[in-house]
Image: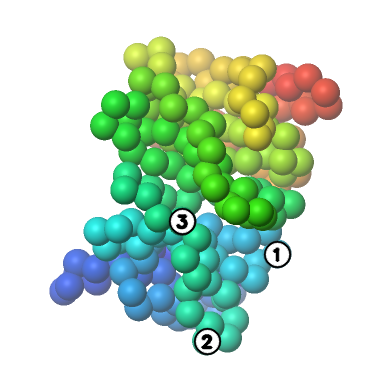
Amino acid sequence: TIAAVSRQDPETSTSDIWLHDLGRGTNTRFTSANMMSPVWSPDGSRIGMRSTTADGALYTKPVRGSSPAELLHKDERRQRPMDWSRDGKYIVKGATDPKTREDIWVIPMSGDRKPFPYLTSEFNEDYARISPDGKWLVYQSDESKRTEVYVQSFPTPGNKVQISTDGGRYPVWSRDGRELYFIAPDGKMMAVAVKMAGKFEAG
C-alpha cells in the first residue's frame, strides 16, 4: 500500500509530493516542481495535484514511468484537487473566491474538461469527498455559523442532509460507503452509519 503525501523542504520552504510505502517504510520523491494536494485516480495509475507556484494550476501525472505532469486546468483563483470519483469521471476541486470564499467545483474528465460550480455560496464549503457509488458528496460548511458536515446528491447538488450535530470537519467515506467519518471539535473521530439506497439516510 502506497500513500501520496505533501512534504515541505525545511531549507527551501518548497513543497513536493512523495510516495510512502506503508509496508516497507520507504519514501520516494514523486515531483520536483513545487506540487502539493495529491489525489489518486481510481485505478491508482495517476495522481492529481496542484502547483504551488503563482498560477496554481492543476496537473495529473502517471505514477509509473518518467512521463511529465500534464496540465489539467488553470484558474486565477487559488485551487486544489480534493477527490477523484471511483468511476474516473470527475475530479472535485476547491477554489477560493474573494466574494464567495471557499467553493466546490467539479472537473469532468472527458470532453472539454471545463469545470462547473457545485457550491458557490457566501459560506465556506470545503473538504469534499465523493461517495464510492458516485451519487453523493460529503463536505464541510460553516453555513450555520459553525462548521458542520453535510451530504448532497452528486454531480448535481440537492437532497441535503446534515451529518454532524455538534460540529465536524474533514469528512471521509468508508471504502464500502456504509459509514462516514469526521473529526469532532474536541478532536475525537466520529463514525456515522449511512444508507444510500434511493434516499440518503444517516444513523
Q: Which residue is mark 2?
A: 66
User: Where residue 68 sits in the image (x, y, percent)?
Assistant: 48, 79
Residue sticking out furthest to the left? 11
Q: Residue at x 40, y 55 (%)?
A: 74
User: Where residue 141 sits in the image (x, y, percent)?
Assistant: 44, 25
User: Which amino acid is tagged 3?
Assistant: His
Q: Which residue is mark 3?
A: 73
User: Which amino acid is tagged 1?
Assistant: Asp
Mark positioned earlier in the residue sequence (2 or 3): 2
Q: Which mark is residue 43?
A: 1
Secondary structure beneath dot 2 equals loop
Mark positioned earlier in the residue sequence (2 or 1): 1
Left or right: 49 as drawn, with respect to 130: left
Work out whether 115 lies above or below 49: above
Residue 170 showing in the rendered view:
no
Q: Residues within 10 Å of mark 2 (few under 14, many from 20)?
A: few
Secondary structure beneath dot 1 equals loop
User: Which amino acid is tagged 2?
Assistant: Ser
| The quarter of the displayed image where residue 13 is located | bottom left
Secondary structure beneath dot 3 equals strand
